[in-house]
Image (cartoon, rainbow, N blue to C red):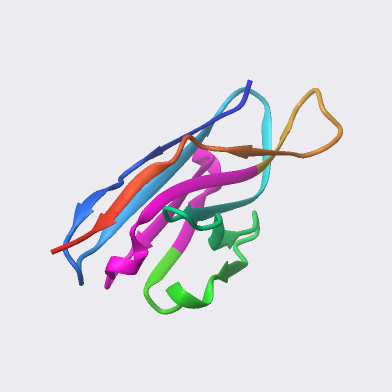
């Protein structure tokens, strides 16, 4: 069984920083692209940032220059460093990963449970 466990959300003032972490657990995993999505109340879930196993990154336009995604392949963990946070960054942030278990010949898409990020004075 594959689980993605997120941590690091919370309440921060505008201009502040937070670091999110997401660790994939399970035996014999091969993980391809990992990423972060967010969903604000009443809005669709959108991509924040993604990173391939080789380290190539992709960012949503609204977070470019402020957020940095990274990963530790040995720990099956992805991070999101969020700086210069704005009230409009307030959302539930979800971790996502394309994972192949040792017994599978294909990759499946997995989601974390979500972590709340609130940016408010």
| Residue 103 on image: x %, y % | 80, 23
Q: Quadrant of residue 58?
A: bottom right
Answer with left or right where residue 86 lies relative to residue 22. left
Residue 54 placement: quadrant:
bottom right
Instruction: Point out the stretch of residues depicted in magenta.
Output: 69-97
Residue shown at the point (86%, 33%) measured from the top left: 105
| Quadrant location of the N terminus in the rendered image | top right
Residue 111, percent from left and from top: 58, 39
Q: 87 and 25: which one is in front? A: 87
- Residue 89: x and y in percent read 35, 64
- Outermost residue on the left side: it is 121
Q: Is residue 16 left or right of residue 112?
A: left
Residue most extreme to the front: 42
Report the front residue among 86 and 81: 86
How far across and how far down the image is residue 120, in percent? 19, 61
Q: Residue furthest right?
A: 105
Say above or below: 62 vs 44.
below
Q: Quick check: is 27 in the magenta stretch?
A: no
Quarter of the figure with residue 121: bottom left
The residue sitting at 61% across, 26% down in the picture is 2
- Residue under the image location 44 percent in, 73 percent down: 63
Q: How many marks?
A: 0
Q: Is residue 4 above or below residue 121?
A: above
Q: Is residue 43 above or below residue 25?
A: below
Q: Is residue 93 above or below residue 56?
A: above
Residue 41 vs residue 117: left or right? Answer: right
């Amino acid at each position: 069984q594959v689980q993605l466990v997120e941590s690091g959300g919370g309440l921060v003032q505008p201009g502040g920083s937070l670091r999110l972490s997401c660790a994939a657990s399970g035996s014999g995993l091969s993980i391809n692209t990992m990423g972060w999505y967010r969903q604000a109340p009443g809005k669709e879930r959108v991509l924040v940032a993604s990173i391939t196993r080789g380290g190539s990154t992709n960012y949503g336009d609204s977070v470019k220059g402020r957020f940095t995604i990274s990963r530790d392949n040995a720990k099956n963990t992805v991070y999101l460093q969020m700086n210069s946070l704005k009230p409009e960054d307030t959302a539930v942030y979800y971790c996502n990963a394309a994972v192949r278990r040792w017994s599978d010949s294909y990759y499946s898409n997995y989601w974390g449970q979500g972590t709340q990020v609130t940016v408010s004075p």
